[in-house]
């Protein structure tokens, strides 16, 4: 199957009150979530996967539709934040207008908080609850077999008009089990951040999945050793082509105090 992972446009994003000049000049950072998922698809399946970052490519909705028509995906995954929800829905509508049989999967922080509301969006076929890396292979392999998907933890979908929620996927405790993001599927030279220049980014911490407020509080037991990442940077002598100019490793100290709050103390 052809899989297309989309970072949707941001024409309707809920933004801050920053001056327009600052907001426009902030740059673009890589969509790490779908880059990790793409890498997992490449590692574990024979499906063909592509990434379409409509934001860094500065695509209009008409251009986005043209790109989707050209790529002819069987499955489309869209990263979903609450503040990008309008653009996510508009993107999903375009996908279905292009080919009504294309399956649409939504994942991200918003769908975890609002799984029922999300699956009730007419264009949405599946919602992934939690970490998609452990869910994506069985979902793709059984995408037309709803009976089998009922056994897969981390999914929401409709079967005979009834909403099926299999619960959140399990956390990946050893983050070093994950492949590195599929940067080769992105126009990586276009990414930059106004304060730091080129922005390849490598996120060993995970923590994109929120329970209430603090992402890292949910994931305190997760482990990612610095050595594999250091070895990776040393092994790949051409790491600079991704935009890496320097790297640092951070250890986080977590302390529990009587009132039940976490204290996060980065130690460089």
Image (spheres, rainbow, N blue to C red):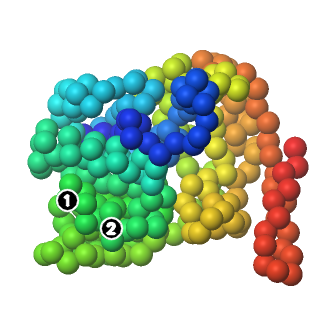
**Residue located at (57% from left, 69% from top):** 211
**Position of 150 relative to 87 (above/below):** below
Residue 22 location (% of width, % of height): 61, 27
Q: Which of marks 2 and 1 is nearer the N terminus?
A: 2
Tell me if mark 1 has few (under 14), some (14-19) or many (20+) residues whose alpha carbon lies within 10 angstroms of its own: few
Secondary structure beneath disc 2? helix
| Quarter residue 143 falls in | bottom left
How many numbered badges does the structure rendering display?
2
**Residue located at (29% from left, 49% from top):** 89
**Position of 115 relative to 74 (above/below):** below
Q: Viewed as shown, does residue 5 lie left or right of 121? A: right
**Residue located at (58% from left, 24% from top):** 21
Residue 68 location (% of width, % of height): 22, 33
Tell me the number on the disc at residue 122. 1
Quarter of the image with the N terminus is: top left
Q: Viewed as shown, does residue 43 lie left or right of 74? A: right
**Residue located at (60% from left, 18% from top):** 241
Secondary structure beneath disc 1? loop
The residue most toward the bottom is 258
Whether residue 30 is visible to the viewer of this picture, yes or no, is yes
Residue 146 location (% of width, % of height): 20, 69
Q: For this rendering, which residue is in front, 177 or 76?
A: 76
Residue 84 location (% of width, % of height): 42, 47
In this figure, which residue is indicated by the disc labeled 2? 117
Distance (Cα) linking label 2 and label 1? 10 Å
């Amino acid at each position: 199957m052809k899989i297309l992972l989309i970072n949707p446009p941001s024409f309707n994003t809920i933004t801050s009150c920053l001056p327009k000049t600052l907001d426009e000049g902030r740059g673009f950072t890589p969509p790490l979530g779908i880059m990790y998922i793409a890498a997992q698809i490449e590692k574990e399946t024979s499906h063909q996967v592509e990434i379409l970052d409509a934001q860094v490519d500065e695509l209009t909705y008409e251009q986005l539709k043209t790109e989707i028509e050209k790529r002819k995906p069987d499955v489309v995954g869209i990263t979903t934040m609450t503040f990008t929800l309008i653009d996510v829905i508009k993107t999903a509508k375009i996908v279905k207008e292009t080919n009504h049989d294309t399956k649409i999967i939504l994942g991200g922080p918003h769908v975890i908080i609002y799984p029922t509301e999300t699956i009730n969006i007419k264009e949405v076929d599946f919602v992934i609850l939690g970490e998609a890396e452990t869910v994506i292979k069985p979902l793709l392999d059984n995408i037309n077999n709803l009976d089998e998907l009922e056994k897969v933890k981390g999914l929401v979908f409709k079967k005979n008009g009834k909403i099926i929620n299999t619960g959140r996927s399990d956390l990946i405790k050893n983050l070093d089990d994950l492949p590195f993001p599929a940067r080769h599927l992105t126009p990586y030279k276009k990414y930059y951040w106004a304060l730091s220049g080129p922005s390849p980014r490598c996120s060993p911490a995970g923590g994109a999945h929120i329970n209430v407020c603090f992402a890292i509080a949910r994931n305190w037991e997760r482990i990612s050793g610095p050595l594999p990442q250091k070895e990776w940077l040393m092994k790949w002598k051409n790491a600079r082509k991704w935009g890496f100019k320097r790297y640092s490793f951070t250890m986080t100290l977590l302390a529990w105090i009587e009132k039940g709050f976490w204290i996060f103390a980065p130690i460089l």
